[in-house]
Structure formats: structure tokens, C-alpha cells
Image (cartoon, rainbow, N blue to C red):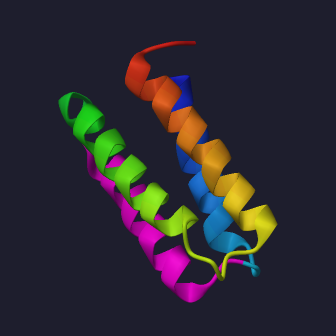
Amino acid sequence: MAELTEVIEVLAGLCEDGAVSKGVKEALQEINTGFACAAPEEISMKVDAALGKLEDLSIDPNLSADVRTRLWNLTCILETLQNGKK
């Protein structure tokens, strides 16, 4: 599943970015761990949970525009994965 690999790579990149706050990194690591430990039949639930968390994170007024844009891009990838497109 190429999209899931892309999601994990984007999450890892965000977690390593110095511009991302500690709280956001913790939430992203939690999402990443959820995908890494998920069985194939659980991926849909993990995507739904990740989308909810990303929505909550993206409305934080303290996020830089770059980080917010990267979170939105990650959301788009997850929505594509959720809809089975690509």
C-alpha cells in the first residue's frame, strides 16, 4: 500500500522537523505508532482517527504556515487512502 508508506514517511519527516512543537510531535508520533502497529483490517479505523487528530492539530493558531500546510497535505493523502483512490 504505497499511500500508507507515504503517510508514514511524511509523519516521520514532521516529527524530525525542528519547527514542529513538542505537543504536535507527540500527536504525530502517536498517529505513526498507530499505523505501524495496525493490522490491515484496522487501517480504515486508524485513518479515521488520524484525520480527526490532524483536524484538531491544524486549527492551532500557534502553528507556522509551513507546518499547517504540511498537515493539510498529510490530510489529503489520508483522505485519498480512505477513499481507495490512486
Q: Check the image and report above or below for 17 versus 49.
A: below
Compared with 70, 74 (above or below) is above
Count of numbered tags: 0
Name the residue rendered at 43%, 71% in the picture: 27
Rendered position, 48 above or below 57: above
Residue at the limit of the structure toward the bottom, as seen here: 22
| Overall secondary structure of the magenta section | helix
In which image quadrant can residue 67 be found?
bottom right
Q: Quadrant of the C terminus?
A: top right
Q: Is 70 placed left or right of 32 in the picture?
A: right
Task: Please indicate whether residue 47 sits to the left or right of residue 73 in the image.
Answer: left
Q: Position of residue 52 (x, y in %)?
A: 36, 53
Q: Residue at x 73, y 73 (%)?
A: 17
- Camera-nearest residue between 27 and 69: 69
Report the side of 56 relative to 15 (left or right): left
Q: Is residue 35 above or below residue 61?
A: above
Residue found 78% across the figure and 66% down from its top: 65
User: Is residue 57 part of the magenta span, yes or no?
Assistant: no
Q: Residue furthest right?
A: 66
Residue 63 on image: x %, y %: 67, 76
Q: Position of residue 71 (x, y in %)?
A: 62, 55
Q: Which residue range is magenta in the image?
A: 20-38
Locate residue 30, reporting x and y percent.
Answer: 37, 67
- Residue drawn at 31 percent across, 42 percent down: 48
Residue 69 sits in quarter: bottom right
Q: Nearer the viewer, residue 73 or 15?
A: 73
